[in-house]
Structures are given as structure tokens and as C-alpha cells.
């Protein structure tokens, strides 16, 4: 009782929450979302998130039994937007917000989700974990939420997690909103509603309105004074050349470096290692190239074997992981010595130590930081195209700044997937707190990250889309900030951004509610596709777009290791054209591991399920835009496998979990309660 009293008192305390008055254009946006689902298109730095905070206040008060879901595309944005909601939402007592991403919810069941939603009013999360909860398992339902916020909603294209949640979880509620189902209000936030080339802008605007079932609204903004405007500059430099056949030389040097190691440890993604090393040499020169070889390959190898040790029960692989971990200091010394030896070997010595482009960047950064050396808060962001450039470029900048005796530090931050969440958060926190003045990062961090004191942005690599130009430039938040572009004509990019803004403000392009509803196509064939579970079951949806993940996850849990589903397939070559002769691999059988042994699903089973239903009648062309004929056949086959597993109620594990609200501690334990029986005869496959 004392603990609960303390919790209630803690929840009622207003700890430093900030109240900002809305600008008239923000008030207009809030009134729009109160009336109907809306996509707010506003430039970066103009307060879209404050509009979202006021919308959260309204819907939590208007529908107190329902929750608000705030979806964001990256892990750093989860932490940032959750903190923003706690600080800027005005309801009393303070709203209860939870951040969900990655491993935090791995293995959650229905009970864990129920407890989470019972304990919190606002959920801030990345979209893929929510897609799985909404669609694959049906642990959560759209009717539990009064408001769905899609931050950076231009990512809702194709078969993205955003798009899947809308099509598979929200559209059915919107269609049946007149019945017992309650459709949530949708709030999309974007500064650039087209996520790609600016062809067919009007059609892409309407596609986004249909997908989100919301009107796009871009209010008129007050004109900025010249003192507030961002300035753009294009940077020029004299091109230098690399030795002829440098790609072959790079591969040769990598072979020399890695050959002794490959005798003991397999190097994952060897082609990618070569490609990244070539890119570093081309962009930065020999110094950056040697740094990449010395410092980047071993951590990649170490992470690979740590992953193997975690996922695999194979004692040989686990032993390899232990051996590598024990030898990391020795191997690091080997990489350092080998990389330094390559500096003086062969034809690569004719490559510049530092490219003219990198030298121009270092001169630019040195001039900027020197001019502002009295301002301890002065900082800037440098964007590069590939992850491989982040750490070597930060190394070059730090070395150059030390040689010039300029007090400033650079740090690489390549986003989740290439560095841990903790490392990424640490780099961002160092930058925000001015412990680091220069952040070198990829486009993964060009959206949404709010550093209000950022004075300049450098685009070292080419910006391939207007969205990238708008989002990256928007990181320069201070008045009179500057954006420097090395590979783009900034005048042309600004013209393209103006085109996009005009299309966003054109009310004549806006679809009506009726027009948006008429364009919903759920692609359903009752009794055949998609699969919603048996009447007595509460289970998620299976469709052509999630069936492979469902089968793969099931097999992983049965075998207690990751695997390629191709290894469970038996295929044959079929002649599909005689003139010219064309053959195609076709799946004829899938051997699915179950607790009771291998269960075979045959081509006859697949054809029996589909009957005369043609794939074209149920396949959403936008979601399957890049699918090959083989991809379509594979999904068609695995859909039947996934349905059979669910109908058979095959369960690979029994899992118990508990949810501890205070401190957001999630504890769960999983225990395999069966022995896996796999036939000793390998599956016969054609070449």
C-alpha cells in the first residue's frame, strides 16, 4: 500500500513540464485533427511534435478509456519523442508514457501487451514491432487506440511496416466504422510527403491520403526575416584520381590482410567488406582506407560470432565464438600491424593520403570551428552516404583539428543496425550536450533528431531525393544556420523543395472522405485469402507479405537457431518458355520442422488451397512492386505452410513472462518443452 501511494504521488508530480503557446498555424493544425484524420505537412523546426502533444491531450481527455499510439521510424526517435510527450503534454496528472523497441518486447505474449496498455496511456514505438503485434499475432487491436500518430509518415509506402499497419489493421476498422468497430483518428507528420523522386507528385500525394485515410494539410506560415533564414552553399574542389584498376588493387590488399584470419574464421559478407573499403578509399584516400581496415573489420567479425553464440546450439560454432572473444586483443594487434604494412606496399601508394574532396572538407570545418572557437555550444552535423565512412571521416577530422590546435571533437554515429542502440544514444547525447561538436552520420539520422543548437550541416555525399535535402537541411535549427553541399546543386534542390511545398498546399488535390474510402481495396477472397484464424481462435492475420516471417520465426524456435528457409525446400526446374528456352526453379515440397517431426507441405497441397484464385486478384501491386516471379511463387507456397501451422495449432515453445511497471523492467523466461525430431535423410533438391 505504501508503494502504491508513492507511485500515485510520483505520477501526480509535474517535474519540469514546459508549456508553449501555439502559433496560429499550429492551432489551425490542432483543430483539423480534432475534426478528422489529418496529415500535417510542415517544414522541420516548425513544431509538428507540439501539435501532436496537443492532439494527445485532446484525445486522452475525450476518450479516456482508449490509448494513444505514437509510431516513429528509428530507435533514437522513440526516446526523443517519449521525452517530448512527458514534457509538453499538459494533462494532469502527468501522462504515463512507455517506450517500446527492439529487444524490450522480444517474446511478449497477450498478457504482457495487456499489462503494458493497462499501465500506460501513450505508447511510443518503432513500427515493425507494432506491425507484428497488430497483424501477425493480433495481441493489440486498432480499436484500443483513439489516436494513431505516424511520425515521418512519408515512410508509409510499399510494404513498409507503416503501410502494413494501415492496410491490414486500420483499413478494416475504417470500412466498418459505422458498426461496432471504432476506427482510430490518424495523425501523420511529415516535412516532405514524397519519399522518392518528384515524379507524379499529385498522384503520390493522393496515394498517401488513401493509405492513411487522412487529408493532407499544409498551413500558410508567416514569412521569415532574412536573419532567420537558412543559407545554402555549394562547395567546389579539384578532383584527384586514383590509380588505374584500384578496385582490383583493393581486393588484392584485402586478400593479403584477411587470408591468415580466414584460415580460422569465416569472414561474413566478404563482398560487402570489399565494396565498403573501395568506397572509403575513393572518398577519403589512403589514410581513411587504412583506418577502416585497422578498426572496422574486426568489430564486424566479433559481432558476427557473438550473434552465432547467442542463436546457435551448435557447439562448434559456440567454441569458435569463444576463441574469437579470447583472441580479440591479439587480433586487433594483427590488424593494426597488417594495415600499417599495407601503407607502404604496392601500387596503392600512388593513391592520395587524403583526397582533395576530404581535404576541402577538413579546411571548411577548420575555418568554421576556428571562427566560432569562443562559442562552446557551436556544433554541426556531417552527412555521408555509407556507414563505412562515418568512423574513418571522424578520425580524419579529429586528427586534422588536433594538428591545427582547434579545440573540437568529431564522433561517428551510423544508426542502429551498424552500431548498438547504447552506442548510438551515447553519441547523440555527447553531441546534444556539446561534449562532441561534430557528428558524422548517415541518412538514418537525418529525420526527426532534434538538436536545437545545431549551427551548420554538411552534405558530404550526394543527396538522391528532395526528401533527403529537406530532412537533412532541417537539422540546422539555429537562426542564420548554413547548409554546405558537396555533391548537389543547392539552387536546384531548393526549387524542387518549393515544388513539393506547393503541391502540399494545393487544396484542389485533396481527396474527400468518400473518395478515400472508395479507393480502399482489402484484396480479400473469403475462405481463401487472407487467413484470419478459425472462429474459436483469436489469432493474427496471415497474408502473402508476412507468411515468410511467420514460418521463419516458427522454424527458428523449433530448431533453436536461425536458418535459411531455402534449406527446407525441395525444388525442381521447369521449362516456362521454349523459344527462347527459359527454365525456372519451382518449389515442390517444404519440410517444416515440428515438435513431432518433419511435416511436409507439397505443391498439391498449395494448389488445393488456392483453387482457381489467381494471384493477381489478391496481390497488392504496390506492396509487391519489386517482387520477381520466384518471389511471388515462394510467398504463395509459404502462405499455405503458415496457414497449416496455425490451423494445426503447432506451438514450438511454452513461454512465461511477467511485466513490472516500475522502472519498466520486463522479465521473461522461455523453455523448450519438446525434443525436435528431424529426419536424418537430407531433403532432395534439384541443382
Image (cartoon, rainbow, N blue to C red):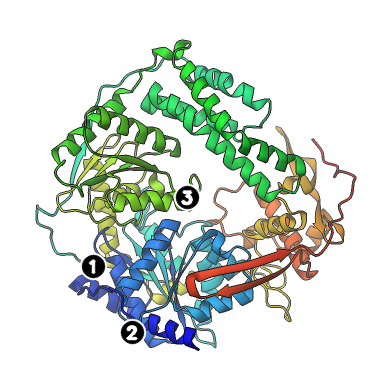
Q: Give the crowd class for mark 1: few <14, some 14-19, many >=20 residues within 10 Å.
A: some
Q: Nearer the viewer, mark 1 or mark 3?
A: 3
Q: Judge the density around disc 2: few (<14), some (14-19), many (≥20) Cα neighbours within 10 Å.
A: few
- Residue 346 position, x and y percent, is 48, 10
Q: Residue furthest top?
A: 346
The single residue placed furthest to the front in the displayed view is 2
Q: Alpha carbon of mark 2 to alpha carbon of mark 1: how far?
A: 30 Å
* Numbered disc in front, either 2 or 1: 2
Q: Is residue 171 visible in the rendered structure shown here?
A: yes
Q: Residue under circle 2?
A: 92
**Marks 2 and 3, the one that precedes in the sequence:** 2
Quarter location, residue 91: bottom left
The Cα–Cα distance between marks 2 and 3, rounded to whole angstroms, is 35 Å
Q: Residues within 10 Å of mark 3 (few under 14, many from 20)?
A: some
- Which label sits on residue 219? 1
Q: Residue at x 90, y 46 (%)?
A: 680
Tag 3 residue: 416
Above or below, 61 relative to 16 = below
Q: Position of residue 451 (x, y in %)?
A: 28, 55
Q: Please state if 437 lies on the left or on the right of 684 as rendered.
A: left
Q: Is residue 431 left or right of residue 676?
A: left
- Element class at badge 3: loop
Amino acid at each position: 500500500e505504501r508503494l502504491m501511494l508513492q507511485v500515485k504521488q510520483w505520477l501526480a508530480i509535474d517535474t519540469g513540464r514546459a508549456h508553449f503557446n501555439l502559433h496560429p498555424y499550429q492551432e489551425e493544425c490542432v483543430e483539423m485533427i480534432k475534426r478528422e484524420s489529418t496529415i500535417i505537412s510542415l517544414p522541420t523546426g516548425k513544431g509538428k511534435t507540439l501539435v501532436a502533444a496537443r492532439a494527445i491531450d485532446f484525445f486522452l481527455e475525450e476518450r479516456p478509456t482508449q490509448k494513444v499510439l505514437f509510431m516513429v521510424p528509428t530507435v533514437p526517435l522513440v526516446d526523443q519523442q517519449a521525452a517530448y510527450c512527458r514534457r509538453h503534454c499538459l494533462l494532469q496528472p502527468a501522462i504515463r508514457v512507455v517506450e517500446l523497441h527492439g529487444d524490450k518486447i522480444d517474446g511478449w505474449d497477450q498478457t504482457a501487451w495487456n499489462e503494458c496498455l493497462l499501465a500506460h496511456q501513450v505508447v511510443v514505438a518503432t513500427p515493425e514491432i507494432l506491425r507484428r503485434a497488430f497483424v501477425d499475432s493480433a495481441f493489440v487491436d486498432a480499436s484500443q487506440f483513439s489516436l494513431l500518430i505516424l511520425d515521418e509518415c512519408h515512410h508509409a509506402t510499399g510494404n513498409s511496416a507503416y503501410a502494413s499497419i494501415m492496410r491490414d489493421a486500420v483499413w478494416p476498422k475504417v470500412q466498418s466504422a459505422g458498426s461496432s468497430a471504432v476506427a482510430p483518428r490518424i495523425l501523420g507528420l511529415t516535412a516532405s510527403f514524397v519519399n522518392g523522386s518528384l515524379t507524379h507528385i499529385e498522384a503520390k500525394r493522393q496515394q498517401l491520403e488513401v493509405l492513411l485515410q487522412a487529408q493532407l494539410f499544409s498551413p500558410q506560415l508567416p514569412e521569415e526575416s532574412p536573419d532567420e533564414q537558412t543559407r545554402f552553399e555549394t562547395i567546389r574542389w579539384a578532383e584527384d584520381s586514383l590509380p588505374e584498376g584500384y578496385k582490383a588493387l583493393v581486393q588484392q590488399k584485402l586478400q593479403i590482410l584477411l587470408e591468415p584470419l580466414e584460415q580460422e574464421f569465416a569472414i561474413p559478407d566478404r563482398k560487402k567488406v570489399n565494396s565498403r573499403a573501395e568506397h572509403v578509399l575513393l572518398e577519403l584516400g589512403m589514410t581513411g582506407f587504412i583506418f577502416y581496415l585497422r578498426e572496422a573489420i574486426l568489430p564486424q567479425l566479433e559481432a558476427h560470432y557473438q550473434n552465432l553464440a547467442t542463436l546457435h546450439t551448435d557447439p562448434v560454432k559456440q567454441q569458435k565464438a569463444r576463441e574469437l572473444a579470447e583472441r580479440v586483443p591479439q587480433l586487433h594487434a594483427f590488424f593494426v600491424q597488417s594495415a600499417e604494412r599495407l601503407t607502404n606496399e604496392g601500387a596503392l601508394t600512388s593513391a592520395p593520403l587524403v583526397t582533395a574532396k576530404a581535404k576541402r572538407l577538413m579546411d571548411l570545418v577548420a575555418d568554421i570551428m576556428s571562427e566560432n572557437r569562443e562559442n562552446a555550444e557551436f556544433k554541426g552535423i556531417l552527412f555521408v552516404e555509407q556507414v563505412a565512412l562515418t568512423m574513418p571521416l571522424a578520425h580524419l577530422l579529429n586528427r586534422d583539428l588536433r594538428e591545427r590546435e582547434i579545440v573540437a571533437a568529431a564522433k561517428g554515429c551510423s544508426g542502429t543496425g551498424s552500431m548498438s542502440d547504447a552506442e548510438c544514444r551515447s553519441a547523440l547525447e555527447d553531441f546534444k550536450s556539446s561534449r562532441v561538436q561534430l557528428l558524422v552520420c548517415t541518412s538514418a539520422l537525418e529525420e526527426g533528431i532534434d538538436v536545437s543548437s545545431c549551427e551548420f550541416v554538411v552534405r558530404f555525399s550526394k543527396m538522391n531525393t528532395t526528401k533527403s535535402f529537406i530532412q537533412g537541411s532541417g537539422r540546422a535549427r539555429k537562426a542564420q544556420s548554413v547548409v554546405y553541399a558537396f555533391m548537389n546543386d543547392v539552387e536546384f534542390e531548393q526549387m524542387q523543395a518549393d515544388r513539393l511545398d506547393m503541391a502540399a498546399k494545393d487544396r484542389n488535390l485533396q481527396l474527400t472522405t468518400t473518395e478515400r474510402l472508395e479507393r480502399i481495396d482489402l484484396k480479400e477472397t473469403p475462405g481463401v485469402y487472407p487467413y484470419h484464424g478459425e472462429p474459436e481462435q483469436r489469432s493474427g492475420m496471415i497474408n502473402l507479405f508476412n507468411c515468410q516471417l511467420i514460418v521463419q520465426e516458427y522454424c527458428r524456435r523449433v530448431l533453436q537457431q536461425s536458418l535459411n528457409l531455402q534449406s527446407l525446400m525441395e525444388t525442381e526446374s521447369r521449362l516456362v518458355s521454349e523459344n527462347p528456352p527459359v527454365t525456372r526453379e519451382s518449389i515442390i515440397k517444404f519440410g517444416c520442422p515440428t515438435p513431432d517431426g518433419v511435416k511436409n507441405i507439397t505443391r498439391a497441397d498449395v494448389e488445393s488451397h488456392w483453387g482457381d484464385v489467381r494471384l493477381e486478384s489478391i496481390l497488392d501491386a504496390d506492396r509487391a512492386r519489386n517482387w520477381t516471379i520466384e518471389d511471388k511463387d515462394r510467398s504463395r507456397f509459404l502462405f499455405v505452410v503458415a496457414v497449416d501451422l496455425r490451423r494445426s495449432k503447432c506451438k514450438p515453445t511454452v513461454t512465461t513472462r511477467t511485466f513490472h511497471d516500475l522502472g519498466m523492467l520486463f522479465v521473461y523466461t522461455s523453455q523448450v518443452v519438446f525434443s525436435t525430431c528431424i529426419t536424418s535423410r537430407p531433403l532432395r533438391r534439384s541443382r
